[in-house]
Image (cartoon, rainbow, N blue to C red):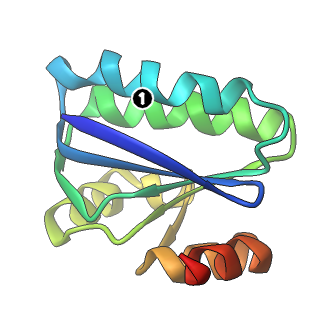
C-alpha cells in the first residue's frame, strides 16, 4: 500500500492506494499519525478511489483516527470509495463512524469551501 497526502487550507487529503489489510494497517496508521497530531488540521479526507479492499484492522485504524480528530472537534471523511469498499463500510456500519462522500471535491465542499477552492486552483 502507498499513501500520499496534500493539504488544502486546513484540510489534509490522504490518498492510500492498494489494500488496507493486516500487512498495510501499521504503515497506514503511521502515515496518518502526523496529521492527527497537527492541531492546525481541521479535517482529514481519505480519498479511497485507489483502495481495493479494507479489512477489519484497517477499519480499526479509521476508528482510532476518528476518535482522535473528534476529541479536538476536527472532522474525518472518506471519499470516492470503490463499490467493494463501500459495501464493507455499509455492512460494518462504518458509514456512521466517518462521513462518506461520493467524490473528493464533494467532501472538500462540505468540510471547507476554502479547501475546495484551493483544490480547484490546483
Badge 1 element: helix
Q: Where is residue 114 shown, x and y percent of the image?
A: 78, 75
From the viewer's side, name the closer residue of 96 and 39: 39
Q: Residues within 10 Å of mark 1 (few under 14, many from 20)?
A: few
Instruction: Determine whether 110 is above or below 15 in the image.
Output: below
Instruction: Determine whether 56 is above or below 42 in the image.
Output: above
From the viewer's side, name the closer residue of 29 and 97: 29
Q: Which image quadrant for residue 40?
A: top right
**Residue shown at 53%/51% (left/top)?**
6
Q: Which image quadrant for residue 80?
A: bottom left
Q: Residue furthest front?
A: 122
Q: Which image quadrant for residue 64?
A: top right
From the viewer's side, name the closer residue of 61 and 90: 61
Q: Where is residue 81 shown, x and y percent of the image?
A: 30, 67
Q: Where is residue 87 shown, x and y percent of the image?
A: 23, 64
**Residue shown at 44%/52% (left/top)?**
94
82 vs 36, left or right, is: left
**Residue shown at 32%/58% (left/top)?**
48
Per the image, the residue denoted by label 1 is: 60
Instruction: Determine whether 19 is above or below 97 in the image.
Output: above
Q: Where is residue 83 shown, x and y percent of the image?
A: 18, 72
Instruction: Determine whether 19 is above or below 108 in the image.
Output: above
122 vs 85, left or right, is: right
Q: How many numbered badges does the structure rendering display? A: 1
117 vs 98, left or right, is: right
**Residue shown at 69%/82% (left/top)?**
117
Amino acid at each position: 500500500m502507498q499513501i500520499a497526502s496534500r493539504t488544502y487550507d486546513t484540510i489534509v487529503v490522504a490518498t492510500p492506494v492498494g489494500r488496507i489489510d493486516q500487512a498495510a494497517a501499521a504503515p497506514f496508521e503511521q502515515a496518518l499519525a502526523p496529521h492527527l497530531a497537527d492541531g492546525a488540521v481541521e479535517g482529514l479526507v481519505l480519498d479511497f478511489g485507489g483502495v481495493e479492499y479494507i479489512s477489519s484492522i484497517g477499519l480499526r485504524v479509521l476508528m482510532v483516527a476518528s476518535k482522535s480528530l473528534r476529541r479536538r472537534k476536527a472532522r474525518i471523511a472518506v471519499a470516492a470509495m470503490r463499490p467493494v469498499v463501500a459495501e464493507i463500510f455499509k455492512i460494518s456500519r462504518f458509514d456512521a463512524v466517518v462521513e462518506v462522500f461520493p467524490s473528493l471535491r464533494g467532501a472538500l465542499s462540505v468540510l471547507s469551501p476554502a479547501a475546495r477552492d484551493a483544490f480547484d486552483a490546483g
